Amino acid sequence: MTQLFSPLKIRGMQARNRVVISPMQQYSGDESARATDWHLAHLTRFALGGAGIVFVESTAVEKRGRSTHGDIGLWEDEQIAPLARVAKALRDNGAVPAIQLGHTGRKAATQTWWHGHGPLGEADAARGEPSWPVVGPSPIPVGDGWPTPQTLETTDVEAIVRAWADAARRAREAGFGALEVHGAHGYLVHQFLSPVANQRSDRYGQDRWRFALEVAEAVRSEWPDDRPLFWRVSLADPIDGGLEVDEMVGLLRALKERGVDVVDCSSGGGIASYPTQGRSVSNSLLFRAEMAGHLRAASGLQVMGVGLVIEPQQAENYLHAGQADLIAVGREALYNPNWAVHAEVSLGANEGYATWPLQYRNYLVRRAAAADALRNPNASRSTV
């Protein structure tokens, strides 16, 4: 048994292995920000492909917190049913259904990547995708040409914390088995944590951790005790001028006290990548394994590693080295939705396609036998 394909239990959640499909935006929600058949088909194929946990993309806790017009949300009860359908399909096919909740703050109102991924403008409005006012901790835009965010009043911040709790309750009702708070990539939680974006004078500026900790408490209050809570951070921060390692460790310890179980160590999306900081940031998204291992040891949280994890042995090595407890695969899974079961075969942890869908196994065993016969025609004749 390899570590990658050993079962994992966190609180009451039991995953069949440690392969996780990262949340990946699809920009394919309907006009009411509800999940569609695209999400059902897109996500279920990863469960069929053997992943232990499958995350739905970052799902907005309020309407203005979307990144694009195609993002999905959980700010209304009417958005529960389509996601419940997805959660059921994932569970029925062997994976733990998981969801990431987020709010993009000053990075909201952007184009989909195929339209440029910049701020929405007149051409987008003419196409039926108008911009909307963006919000943030302070009136500091992402960069030149980006809108200046409206500063959230203290009461507005409190309302957004409640929106996180309400979205967590809806995720619970939809049947998800794990939930993640998006605290990285320069989105709203990350903005409050960073002096680059947060220059407030109220209690959310004097204590930059406060918003994150209140969000954790609010989400945990609506999230069942037997289901794990993940939290995404950016390991680019100490490199790119954001949170230093010691501060990140302190934050993670405080989050653990509030019921967070797993830190999702994203390798990109540092706050200092914003043009307002005037810095050039490395484009490398390789998993920063040594730093993740340090955070794991210092915080007491389990670690989910992500960042160009392509080779199965590479994933196995991170686990053996104590640098991760789970391995998340993103773009590689888009290229190969069967990454998990292929990795299992590669690591010698699967015989006779035993963990592939039952409907596939007979065909694949016969396919393997036919391939062996073609490679060894003499052996095949001698056994007839």
Image (cartoon, helix red, strand yellow):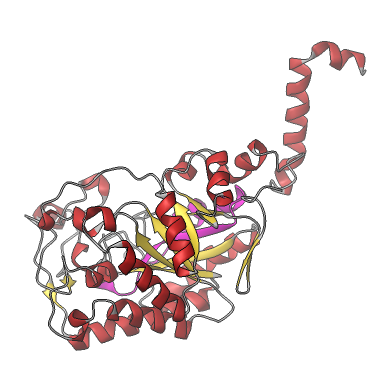
Q: Position of residue 44 (x, y in %)?
A: 55, 54
Q: Quadrant of residue 12?
A: bottom right
Q: Is residue 141 left or right of residue 173?
A: left
Say whether residue 23 is visible. Answer: no
Q: Image quadrant for the C terminus?
A: top right
On screen, 140 above or below 26?
below
Q: Position of residue 143 (x, y in %)?
A: 10, 57
Depth order, front residue of 314/20: 314
Q: Is residue 55 left or right of residue 279?
A: right
Q: Quadrant of residue 22?
A: bottom left
On screen, 184 above or below 139?
above
Q: Is residue 341 left or right of residue 211?
A: right
* Picture residue at 35% right of the left edge, 77% below the top: 75
Residue 57 is a magenta residue: yes
On screen, 153 above or below 181?
below
Q: Which residues are magenta?
A: 34-63
* Picture residue at 21% right of the left edge, 88% below the top: 155
Q: Position of residue 49 (x, y in %)?
A: 60, 47
Q: Residue at the left extreme?
A: 144
Q: Is residue 94 left or right of residue 285?
A: right
Q: Position of residue 331 (x, y in %)?
A: 42, 44
Q: Residue at the bottom extreme?
A: 155
* Picture residue at 26% right of the left edge, 61% below the top: 67
Depth order, front residue of 81/71: 71
* Picture residue at 55% right of the left edge, 58% below the top: 325
How many marks overall? 0
Say whether residue 360 is visible. Answer: yes
Residue 22 is a magenta residue: no
On screen, 237 above or below 102?
above
